[in-house]
Image: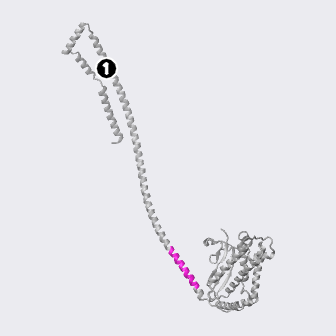
Amino acid sequence: MSPPEKRRGNSHAIRASASSRNSSVISPLPRAQLTRAASSSSSPGPENDNAHDATNSGNKDGGTPMATKEKETILLKEKDDKIAELRRELAVMEAEFTRDLDSLCQKEGETANFWQAKHASLNQQFARADTELRLLRAEVDVREAERAELREGWEVLRKELKERDDEIRSLKGHIAGLKQWVSTSTARGDQTSDEEFGDSMAKLANGLQNWVIVHFRRTRLDFSHLDEAIICDLSELVPMYEQLASSAKVHLLQNVISSILVETIFNAYFVGLPKEQADQLAQVENYLASLSSIEAVNQWRAMTLTVLRKEATRRMQEETALVTESVISRVNNILDAITDASATDTRDHALRALVRSAIELARLLVVQKATFKVYMPKILPHQRILFETSTMEDIGAEDEERLTGRDIHCVTFPGIIKTGDENGGHPQFTNIVAKARVLCTPE
């Protein structure tokens, strides 16, 4: 049975109990009983006879029995009227009570229906939320398992990567040792290893950089009062000098000096040898190259220039000194013209030491059976030269991966490329002995 029906049943029980209670409390005696009581009271009997005798005796004594009957009749009528009035009030009250009870039952039923629907809705929402929570917990468990599996895989990959890195470092060290061993074991006479040439170029580059920083760090560049000869010489050495002046003063000066060293010393056939004899030897080498193999020609050149380096160096001191002084004079003419600095003995002495080191390195390069070429890219207007990781080294300390495809802004020092082996053969083999030092354009 539903709650409204229970309440309705309870209300009917309450109504029945209330009506029975009211009827037991205020319900008057029926009219027949009253008439019977009156007739019994008026019927003759022993007691009535006695009362009648008493009354008669009273009447006889002067009482009024008719007045007493009238009073009783009036009292009975008043009681009947009162009972009728009470019954009417009871009927009204029962009607109101029934109406209020029906209204309450209806409202109670509506309220019960509302809360039942609300309970059912909330129960459904709870069931859905509970189901979603269970699904989410199951998904979280799956994700945690996947995460743990990924962590295990990541740890395995890290270990493998570390092992590979260790193996790569070990192999690189082994290869470097083999290269050094091969270079040392195959060297004969004045043959020098690639590592020694790389160290010599690095020392020369660092010395040149320190010389520029020490003597020109606080100077200012000024191109407004240059004569035509200085402008032509500077344009030939560094065509983009005006663009470099505002942002890379020190690098511009290094570029100027390095270009002079490459042009005068490293590109010479043999420094100290007069130009006529150098041209003759170059012609002979070209003639031999048309008749014999490259290996034989390289061995002839190495042997011939080794003789000059060992036996005729003292005789070439005058020519070597002229070359040295010409380099110093050219450097001073250009730098004194474009800066507010002036040449001093201390500055010239330090520069002379750098030039002599460059001459010794250039002579040592040409007496090798392999061919060593000192290369220095020249940046021309409206021409792009891109950064190459294999042959160039950025002095801006940027990551090489980010420099791929970037334009070169300035070349501060040349590099060395080796062609062939220590015997002068296999010209298809090349090795970068020293990378050119460059400055890339900013992003």
As drawn, the residue found furthest toward the front would be 346
Task: Let me know if residue 262 appears in the view.
Answer: no
Q: Percent position (x, y) of residue 77?
A: 31, 18
In the picture of the structure, the residue carrying the numbered disc 1 is 79
- Can you tell which quarter of the image residue 178 is in? bottom right
Q: Is residue 41 left or right of residue 321?
A: left
At a point 38% along the width and 33% down the height, the residue shown is 100
Compared with 240, 143 (above or below) is above
The image position of residue 39, as x and y in percent, is 23, 17
Q: Is 126 drawn above or below residue 365 in the view shown?
A: above
Q: Please tell me how crowded label 1 is: few (under 14), some (14-19), or many (20+) other residues with Cα within 10 Å.
A: few
Please provide the residue range marked out in magenta.
Answer: 161-180
Query: Which sits in the foreground, 414 or 337?
Result: 337
Helix, strand or loop status at disc 1: helix
Relative to 186, is 286 on the left or the right?
right
Give the residue at x 29% y 28%: 24
Considering depth in this image, is 376 or 103 the residue closer to the camera? 376
In the image: residue 414, left or right of residue 37: right
Q: Position of residue 238 (x, y in %)?
A: 73, 75
As displayed, is residue 83 above or below residue 13? above
Nearer-the-camera pick, 60 or 108: 60
